Image (cartoon, helix red, strand yellow):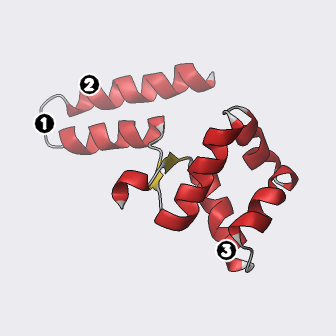
Amino acid sequence: MTEQQPTIPQFIADWIVSQKQTGMNIYGALSELYKHKKVSTWSNNVDDTLTYKTLCDAWFYGYKIESSETDEIVDKLVRHIQSDDFEDILRSSVRAFIIRDGIK
């Protein structure tokens, strides 16, 4: 069944969990999608048919969480933590965060 498990952002997974915890069924959750701004915005950026299929597949078959840029950097650091080039990798990663976030 993992073939039907879509990869979704963490906030979509959180929304699915919260809907299920309140006893909502998939039909009710999809019909109230517009009430959840971030989820609604995400769904508006994708074709409606694909959005509903993705959400239904995630609801019924489970899902994988999208890897974020931060997760990828952490994974890279962990892989290289005992290597000789760890200091260079750490410096370049921190530099990337500073540039991306405009930290001064």
At label 3, the amino acid type is Lys
Residue drawn where x is 57% and y is 48% of the image: 54
Mark 1 nearby-residue class (10 Å; few <14, some 14–19, many ≥20): few
Mark 3 nearby-residue class (10 Å; few <14, some 14–19, many ≥20): some
Q: Which residue is mark 1?
A: 83
Q: Which residue is mark 3?
A: 20
Q: Nearer the viewer, residue 6 or 75?
A: 6
Q: Earlier in the sequence, mark 1 or mark 2?
A: 1
Residue 87 percent across, percent down from the top left = 25, 30
Residue 32 percent across, percent down from the top left = 84, 59
Residue drawn where x is 19% and y is 38% of the image: 80
Q: Is residue 10 left or right of residue 92?
A: right
CB atoms of marks 3 and 2 within 8 Å: no
Q: Earlier in the sequence, mark 3 or mark 2?
A: 3
Secondary structure category for the residue under label 1: loop
Q: Is residue 98 left or right of residue 38?
A: left
Q: Which residue is mark 2?
A: 88
In whole angstroms, how far apart are the C-alphas of marks 1 and 2? Answer: 10 Å
Q: Nearer the viewer, residue 35 or 81?
A: 35
Residue 45 percent across, percent down from the top left = 70, 31
Q: How many marks?
A: 3
